[in-house]
């Protein structure tokens, strides 16, 4: 059947043009909105504490779509989406040790990696009925004001989940203790430094604690931690030519400044790092309300390992800003 040209012009064309125009408008609207929200929060460093020494950055984060052009070293990238349903024989027959996981740069969500973390690198939360062991139990919020700032954004949310990387002793300047004690939050406290971690473990925090470091690559890795007195307690990355500090809490500097350890002897030890996503799977939680990232200079590398289409992090708090390159990267995941 022949359709008259007039009919095409007046019937089909508007019905095609209109949806296309609408889509274009929606796209422009999305760009403008996302840019303005993003720009707003970037410039909005919080200045809630009186001793705000370091620039800080709070970013509400949305889970991205599945379109990121990035390899995250996940099981499904290697074995296909249905890897869990059709387990490869190799997976169950491997000798799952941390050396094996490091050497083979195992996937972030490899069952062996998850099992290793759960068995050897996680301390379970203390029961709510177990009392805290705090130096100053009357101080409800020992943070520099960050906790209140975050809670303003999260509208005093209760029963939330946090990750605090650089948890120090679990009390001094803790950004999460207030939420845990007063608003029934739980979470994951990560502290690489062994002296601090010992103190942290003794606090009876109602959160998972772990003395690992966060990988700057999307696989488990071993690094060397330099906790020599007077140094910045930096982690030296073993596999890089130039050692770079990858994880240290600014709070650790307090301990060194206080001079609680007067020895001049070099204090080097190995530390095991896991990707943040591996840690999240190990604690069975990929929805995070508040992520406090207190590490020195490697924020971006740690953030890049996170498969953003698999996790949902509401707010990230940076203690040091890396404005240009962090901002560029974050604009991708927002
Ligand atoms: C959150 O709690 C604080 C302290 O209890 C209170 O001052 C503030 O008004 C609360 N904010 C909201 C949004 O409920
Ligand atoms: C560890 O830090 C100390 C103090 O800064 C430094 O002298 C030493 O060379 C560092 N060790 C390594 C292996 O980098």
Image (spheres, helix red, strand yellow):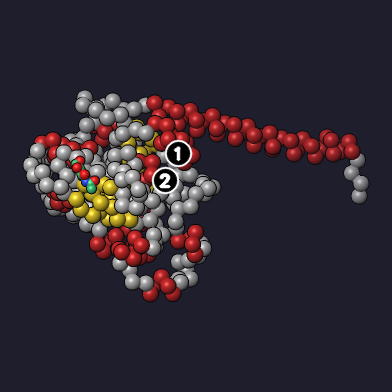
Instruction: Tell me if label 1 and label 2 are in contact, CB under 8 Å.
Output: yes
Q: Position of residue 2 (x, y in %)?
A: 92, 46
Structural crowding at the residue carrying mark 1, measured as other residues with C-alpha within 10 Å and reported as few (<14), some (14–19) or many (≥20): few
Q: Position of residue 217 (x, y in %)?
A: 38, 51
**Tag 1 residue:** 329
Q: Is mark 2 within 8 Å of ligand 2?
A: no
Residue 111 occupies quadrant: bottom left
Q: Pick whichever, 181 or 89, lies toward us.
A: 89
Residue located at (41% from left, 70% from top): 91
Residue 115 occupies quadrant: bottom left
- Compared to residue 244, the image places residue 219 above or below, namely below
Tell me the SS state at disc 1.
helix
Quadrant assignment for ligand 2: top left
CA separation, marks 1 and 2?
8 Å
Q: In the drawing, what numbered circle is on residue 250?
A: none
Tell me the SS state at disc 2.
helix
Residue located at (49% from left, 64% from top): 79
Structural crowding at the residue carrying mark 2, measured as other residues with C-alpha within 10 Å and reported as few (<14), some (14–19) or many (≥20): some
**Tag 2 residue:** 304
Residue located at (42% from left, 35% from top): 325
Q: Position of residue 306 (x, y in %)?
A: 41, 48
Q: Pick whichever, 295 or 236, lies toward us.
A: 236
Q: Pick whichever, 152 or 24, lies toward us.
A: 24
Q: Judge from the rendering whether residue 64 lies leftward or rightward of residue 256; answer left or right.
A: right
């Amino acid at each position: 059947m022949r359709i008259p040209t007039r009919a095409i012009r007046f019937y089909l064309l508007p019905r095609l043009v209109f949806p296309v125009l609408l889509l274009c408008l929606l796209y422009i609207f999305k760009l403008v909105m996302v840019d303005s929200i993003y720009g707003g929060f970037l410039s909005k460093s919080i200045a809630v504490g009186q001793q705000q020494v370091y620039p800080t950055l709070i970013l509400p984060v949305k889970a991205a779509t599945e379109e990121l052009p990035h390899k995250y070293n996940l099981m499904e990238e290697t074995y296909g989406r249905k890897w869990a349903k059709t387990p490869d024989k190799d997976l169950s027959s491997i000798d799952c040790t941390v050396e094996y996981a490091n050497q083979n740069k195992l996937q972030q969500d490899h069952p062996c990696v998850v099992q290793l973390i759960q068995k050897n690198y996680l301390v379970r939360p203390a029961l709510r009925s177990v009392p805290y062991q705090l130096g100053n139990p009357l101080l409800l919020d020992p943070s520099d004001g960050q906790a209140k700032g975050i809670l303003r954004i999260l509208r005093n949310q209760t029963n939330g989940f946090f990750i605090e990387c650089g948890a120090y002793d679990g009390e001094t300047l803790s950004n999460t203790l207030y939420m845990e004690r007063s608003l029934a939050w739980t979470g994951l406290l990560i502290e690489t430094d062994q002296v601090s971690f010992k103190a942290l473990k003794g606090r009876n925090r109602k959160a998972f604690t772990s003395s690992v470091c966060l990988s700057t690559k999307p696989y488990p890795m071993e690094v060397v931690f330099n906790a020599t007195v007077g140094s910045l307690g930096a982690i030296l990355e073993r596999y890089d030519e130039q050692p770079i500090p990858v994880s240290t809490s600014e709070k650790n500097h307090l301990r060194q400044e206080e001079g609680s350890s007067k020895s001049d002897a070099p204090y080097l030890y190995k530390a095991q790092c896991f990707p943040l996503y591996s840690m999240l799977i190990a604690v069975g939680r990929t929805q995070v309300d508040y992520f406090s990232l207190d590490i020195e200079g490697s924020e971006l590398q740690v953030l890049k390992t996170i498969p953003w289409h698999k996790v949902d992090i509401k707010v990230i708090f940076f203690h040091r800003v890396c404005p240009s390159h962090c901002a560029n990267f974050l604009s991708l995941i927002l």
